[in-house]
Image (tube, rainbow, N blue to C red):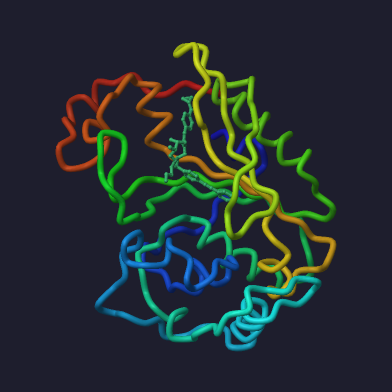
Amino acid sequence: MIFLQMGFEEMPTNNYVESSFWNFDALFQPQQHPARDSHDTFFLREPSTTKTLPEDYVERVKQIHESGGHGSRGYGYDWKREEANKNLLRTHTTAVSSRMLYALAKKPFEAKRYYSIDRVFRNEAVDRTHLAEFHQIEGLICDRGLSLGDLQGVLHDFFSRLGMSKLRFKPAYNPYTEPSMEIFGYHEGLKKWVEVGNSGMFRPEMLLPMGLPEDVTVIAWGLSLERPTMILYGIDNIRDLFGHKVDLSLIKSNPICRIGL
Ligand code: FB9
């Protein structure tokens, strides 16, 4: 409801299986980045490789990784098509954002506000707040001449509707955004600052090879669905909220969420 009220439209996220190309390469994430090995990512044995990719666009992505362009010097490594072809369980819904922005670039430019809320998979150590899968929430705004101030503005709007009007931003790093910011919110109930997400401006090395006009900028942010829900309902262990051990009567008896409405 919060995203719809803010004029965002939902992205189609109904594919858990994705190619490394859309999950990583299209996002200018280099092929030797640690997140791309099987310690963090679930790769598929069958089907192990993707069938089709847009060849002309793939060539431009190869260029930007290997030798740059548009003022960037790129990464200067030998980009391998077979690495990009590998199928995996998507590690973030940002993989869907890359598909949507590429689709947008194929049409006369129109500003867009998109969001996604769906499952992502990470081969990480599980503990009371982490499982090998969680739901990512992502918002992005694609328009001409957006600034970091516009990103901080929309974050204030979004999180104030989640009951957090006081935010702090900490410089961070993502391969696909520059600048990037971790987001912290003051939680009145817990009387403390909590990390509420991550954000940034998608890099030109991601957007220009897609064919988007030079002056088009994209601001984006992400968070999880499980973390706020655990805090809101005072749930200590994520297994009580999500997964095969959940007590369904708890789900049925809990009051529905009224935040932001
Ligand atoms: O959700 C998180 N915290 C959170 C969010 C809301 C909230 O609301 C209160 C109740 C009212 C409370 C807490 N986090 C993100 C922060 C931490 O929990 C963090 O430790 C774990 N993060 C997950 C990833 O862990 C590896 C949460 C998950 C996360 C982090 C970043 C992104 C998405 C999910 C992202 C992104 C992104 C960045 C740039 C461009 C596009 C997407």
Quadrant of residue 213 in the image?
bottom right
In the image shown, does 179 or 106 lie closer to the viewer?
A: 179
Nearer the observer, 178 or 239? 178
- Pinpoint residue 187: horizontal percent, then vertical percent: 51, 17
Identify the residue at horizontal 25%, vertical 78% (top origin).
46
Residue furthest to the front:
76
Taking 255 as reference, is 204 above or below it?
below
Q: Quadrant of residue 246?
A: top left
Residue drawn at the location 65% of the way across and 33% of the way down: 169
Q: Residue 49, located in which quarter of the rendered image?
A: bottom left
- Residue occupying the point 15% across, 37% down: 245
Q: Is residue 216 above or below residue 119?
A: below
> Where residue 110 sits in the image (x, y, percent)?
77, 60
In screen coordinates, is 59 left or right of 249? right
| Quarter that holds the N terminus | top right
Q: Nearer the viewer, residue 253 or 150?
A: 150
Give percent across and percent down for residue 112: 70, 54
On screen, residue 134 above or below 43: above
Query: Is 78 rendered above or below residue 89?
Result: below
Which quadrant is the C terminus positioned in? top right
